[in-house]
Image (cartoon, rainbow, N blue to C red):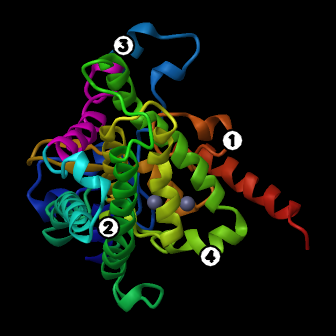
Amino acid sequence: MERKLLKNNLLGTSCLAENNLNIDDSGFGTRDHRDHYSPNKRVTYPPIFTWPAQPIATLKWFFGFPGYFLPWNTFYVVIGMISWYWLSPPLEKMATPTLSLFMLIFFRNTILVTAYYGIFHLRLYIQRQQGTCFKFNPSWTSVNNKKFLFKNQTTDNLILTFSCGVTIWAGLEVGMLWLAANSFINIISVSEHPIYFMFVVLTIHLWRDFHFYLIHRLIHWGPLYRFVHHVHHKNNNPGPWSGLAMHPVEHLLYFSCALIYLLLPFHPAFAVICLAHAGLSPAPGHSGFERITVDKNRSVDIDGYAHYLHHKYFECNYADGILPLDKWFGSFHDGSPESNERMKKRLIEKSLKRPL
Ligand SMILES: [Zn+2]
Ligand SMILES: [Zn+2]
């Protein structure tokens, strides 16, 4: 019986049997002797970064699905726009911020986080609608594990997300809107600068990729890793709520991505969209699944493998997005055995360089 189950898991047929699905992950990847799932599809970068240039593929990537705009980039921009234009106090009121104005923004962000992260957690970890189908690590989030607050990974992640993450996000947002409301910075009008406005909004995603890579490399530096970033890395088998489960110093660095817009001709929407992007986008990447089933026959890729590999191995894939920074700086892991060998070599070289 045990052998049959193991064989079924290795072939991925467990998805079919357990969850009434007509698809299973064996068509998309393989499972090792520990039942850990690896997609056949390698982590890749968009054709815009390949040489010789591929103009048709690049155009398809920009305007196709999935592509630069759809679905993720547009989704976060729309949420940010709605947050600024319909779910924020008028800018004049922010000139003298009060506790109630802060709470308004805090509650708006809390609702966004609860709804978005909650959907992934509910569907994948509470209802377990697809079981371990497409799940990288066959184990569920930890319970009775001393390294987490209250010995429970999800409880730990929820406390860190709401007590520090959403608070720091709201604090930075209030601070930036206060600067804008008091005209301490140069504010533009959308009607006068529509092209500049759209350009900034549609490149927030790229800036966030670059900023995340920089601060992520920084907090992997020994002392900062030990005091700050190890809190996030307790989640070596992450769930959606692990996305914002960070030390407060990491939250500050992480959300500081929005500050760059203070140096440019500013519009409040830039700050609100950038912070909403930072606050929401970690959910799919930490879900622990390669794909989410949308019905019995179909599933969609949620692009979580690159960052899952970072949580699994620590010393690879510091960037998590479009820009091939890891490739340029030698820390890229595409999920292949060759990448694994290269990473092991790097780690050996690094340990040899360390003073005894
Ligand atoms: Zn992470
Ligand atoms: Zn890290």
Q: Was residue 304 drawn as part of the magenta stretch in this picture? A: no
The yes-or-no answer for disc 4 within 8 Å of ligand 2 is: no
- SS at mark 3 in the image: helix
Marks 2, 4: nearer the viewer: 4
Which of marks 3 and 1 precedes in the sequence? 3
Is there a contact, CB below 8 Å, between mark 4 and mark 3? no
Q: Is residue 265 left or right of residue 16?
A: right
Q: Residue furthest right?
A: 356
Q: Which residue is mark 2?
A: 241
> What segment is highlighted magenta in the picture?
62-85
What residue does disc 4 label?
227
Closest to the observer: 213 or 335? 213
| Residue at 53% from the left image edge and 56% from the top image edge | 310
Asked if residue 282 shows in the view, the reply is no
Quadrant of the snapshot with the N terminus: bottom left
Earlier residue among tags 2 and 4: 4
Residue in view at x 66 percent, y 34 percent: 328
Dot 1 amino acid type: Gly
At x 11% / y 43%, what residue is drawn? 297
Secondary structure under the numbered disc 2 in the rendered image: helix
The answer to whether marks 1 and 3 mark residues whose Cβ atoms lie closer than 8 Å is: no
- The amino acid type found where label 4 is placed reads Phe
Q: Nearer the viewer, mark 2 or mark 1?
A: 2
Pointer 2 local density, CA inside 10 Å: few below 14, some 14–19, many at least 20: many
Give the residue at x 70% y 62%: 221
Quadrant showing the C terminus: bottom right
Q: Is mark 3 within 8 Å of ligand 1?
A: no
Residue marked by disc 3:
59
The type of residue carrying mark 2 is Trp
